Amino acid sequence: MAELQPISAALEALLADVSLVGTESVPLEAAAGRVLAEAVTAQLDVPPFDNSAMDGYALRASDAGKWLPISQRIAAGSPAAPLAEGSCARIFTGGEIPPGADCVVMQERVEVADNQALMPTDIPSGDNIRLQGRDVRRGQPLLAAGERLEAAALGHLAGQGVTVVSVRRRPRVALLSTGDEIIDPGTPLKPGQLYNSNRPMLKRLLETFGAEVVQLVSVPDDFDQTVALLTNAAADADVVVSTGGVSVGEEDHVKAALESLGQLDMWKLAIRPGKPLALGRLPREDGSEARFVGLPGNPVSGFVGAWLFLRPLMGALLGCSALNALPTLTASANFTTQTGPRQHYMRVALRFSEAGIIADAFEDQNSGVLSSCISVDALAVIDPHQQVEKGTLVRCLWLQR
């Protein structure tokens, strides 16, 4: 029997010699979730001018405690005139600080009568002013290549007036489902058949990881057809993902088809769930290769395998380090378990308490129980041959979308 391979070796084989996908330019409003292809340098100060942090009155701090005439009114978006000596300016949040003023006092602290304002005595210079360039200075790095463009990063770019951004194109993925017994929803089930739960689950996960699923293919239990469909998938995709067909059954043709076409890098991992997982490469006519990830057919194995292998693979293709490794938390186990020779990835829900983080394991950890993945927060990583009691500290991979 072949020795089971460790997860670290599988990841090393999977990510070896990965080349970045190409780039494309997209409108900023369509760039959410995309990965920045080039570093961006700030072209503007943010904010671009000193402005008021609140509604109130702009003045010289040396005039604190005095009645001052209100010499101008400054709304956000309106230019400010120099502040007359011995006066104050009515100003609103975001309004430009007039030249000569060095502080703003909130309106609730000011008494107003006959276009005069009585200032409080304790107003420090610089109070309630957002200085030009406080957030960003022109010429400084704004965002690095590889940044995933989520809400704040998009706002950062918009604040520079950016309308078009250079991003990595989405890795193209062909998703193959094997097995004559697996059919699509909408077709009446015959005896021995199952609906394909892996396809929509993995498609959504792949899209969450930044991929574009370009093929959804059902593969019959036939070696020649499996070879033909793998060949076609490799020609169209950067990554070919299959579910099922990588074990040792007589109708499991994917591993043999992969070996006949290209290269099997890794098979049979020391992991639970997901031992019969295959990693390899499929050649194309132009001499390049498509990566191949053969996930087991059990849906939980596919779910766990997607997080452990497909997510970092997408990160490597996109040059996005945020996708390379899941955040790690240490939690107190609220369960007991005993592992065998394989590393166990247990589905857990996390509770954050004053005493620390508590991991509650789903009662049924069988690889066919997909319901355990619906409300899962993390995968508790239990090393081989370990006894875990309640209160044992365990390492958890936080499944951040």
Image (cartoon, rainbow, N blue to C red):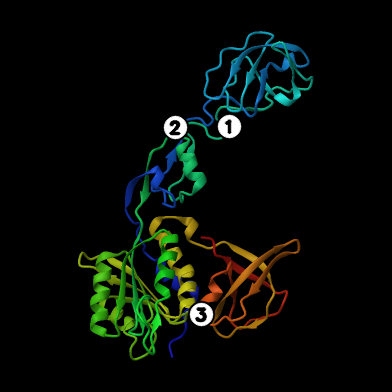
Along the polypeptide, which appears first: circle 2 or circle 3?
Answer: 2
Residue at far top of view: 85
**Residue 242, placed above or below residue 149:** below
Q: Position of residue 123 (x, y in %)?
A: 75, 22
**Disc 1 secondary structure class:** loop
> For mark 2, what is the residue?
43
Identify which amino acid the numbered label 3 is placed on.
Answer: Pro
Amino acid type of the residue tagged 1 in the rendering:
Arg
Asked whether, in this view, residue 264 is left or right of residue 67, the answer is left
Q: Residue 242: x percent and y percent?
A: 36, 75
Residue at the (41%, 51%) spot, across then down? 34
The residue that appears at 59% across and 64% down in the rendered structure is 328
Residue indicated by mark 1: 134
- The tag on residue 391 is none
Residue corresponding to mark 3: 273
How crowded pointer 1 is (Cα within 10 Å; few <14, some 14-19, many 20+) is rated as few
- Residue 321 position, x and y percent, is 47, 56
Among numbered discs 3 and 1, the one appearing first in the sequence: 1
User: Looking at the picture, how far across and down is residue 269, in whole percent?
Assistant: 46, 80
Q: Which of 396 and 400 lies nearest the eye of the viewer?
A: 400
Disc 2 vs disc 3: which is toward the camera? 3
